[in-house]
Image (tube, grey):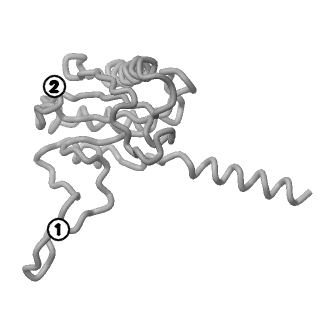
């Protein structure tokens, strides 16, 4: 009897740890999107040494951007309950006075499963779901949010193309970075 219980507990543990946890607060999201906020990505080495040290807490490889792991029902754009915490932090950040005059790209991404066409449409629907949540729950003007789907063209981890880490929504401050228009 102990073996089935232990196996069940191990399965639950691995299932819980397999999904990337979203631990960013609204202030951390705000700072990553605010071009005037110091970024944690690089710092100078002390004592006049050359080079930089990379801070492992960088959430996106693009400046003034953040990757958010928003969970959806399988094969749909329906938000799951655990996404609400992440989206509430994002909504609070986007309504901060330092960001209220900024426009944002809400970029949907998928993993590599499925066809290019299907993933493209799904990524757009998921990005739209995030934008609609922000508009409905935080009164953020739709004119501040540009929605775009990338499908499976920009995998977060190309070495694991089918991994859930690739299924994400990226938010980019367009007012700070005009390369994403």
User: In the figure, is residue 71 to the left or right of 30?
Assistant: right
Above or below 17: residue 67: above
Above or below 48: residue 163: above
**Residue 97 drawn at (x, y percent):** 16, 36
Residue furthest right as drawn: 1
User: In the figure, is residue 21 to the left or right of 38?
Assistant: right
Q: Residue at x 40, y 46 (%)?
A: 157
Q: Choose between 99 and 18: the one closer to the eye.
A: 18
**Residue 123 drawn at (x, y percent):** 40, 24
Q: Whole-Å distance between the Cαs marked 2 and 1?
A: 30 Å
The mark that comes first in sequence, 2 or 1, is 1
**Residue 2 drawn at (x, y percent):** 88, 60
Q: Quadrant of the N terminus?
A: bottom right
Q: Residue at x 28, y 21 (%)?
A: 147
Q: Residue at x 64, y 52 (%)?
A: 14
User: In the figure, is residue 88 to the left or right of 35?
Assistant: right
Above or below 83: residue 181: above
User: In the figure, is residue 107 to the left or right of 143?
Assistant: right
Q: Choose between 153 and 173: the one closer to the eye.
A: 153
Give the number of the disc on residue 52.
1
**Residue 76 drawn at (x, y percent):** 52, 21
Q: Quadrant of the C terminus?
A: top left
Q: Residues within 10 Å of mark 1 (few under 14, many from 20)?
A: few
Give the number of the disc on residue 181.
2
Q: Choose between 73 and 140: the one closer to the eye.
A: 73
Q: Secondary structure at mark 2?
A: loop
Q: Quadrant of residue 176?
A: top left
Above or below 79: residue 8: below
Q: Secondary structure at mark 1?
A: strand
Q: Are marks 2 and 1 in contact (CB under 8 Å)?
A: no
């Amino acid at each position: 009897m102990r073996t089935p219980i232990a196996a069940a507990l191990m399965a639950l543990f691995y299932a819980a740890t397999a999904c990337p946890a979203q631990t960013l607060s609204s202030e951390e999201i705000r700072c990553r999107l605010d071009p005037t906020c110091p970024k944690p990505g690089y710092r100078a080495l002390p004592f006049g040494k050359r080079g930089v040290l990379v801070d492992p807490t960088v959430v996106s490889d693009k400046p003034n951007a953040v990757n958010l792991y928003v969970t959806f029902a399988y094969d749909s754009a329906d938000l799951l309950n655990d996404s609400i915490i992440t989206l509430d932090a994002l909504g609070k950040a986007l309504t901060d006075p330092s960001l209220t005059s900024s426009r944002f790209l809400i970029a949907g991404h998928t993993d590599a499963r499925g066809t290019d066409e299907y993933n493209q449409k799904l990524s757009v629907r998921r990005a739209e779901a995030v934008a609609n949540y922000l508009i409905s729950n935080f009164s953020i003007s739709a004119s501040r949010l540009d929605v775009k789907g990338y499908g499976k063209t920009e995998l977060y981890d190309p070495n694991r193309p089918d991994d859930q880490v690739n299924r994400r929504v990226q938010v980019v401050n367009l007012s700070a970075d005009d390369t994403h228009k």
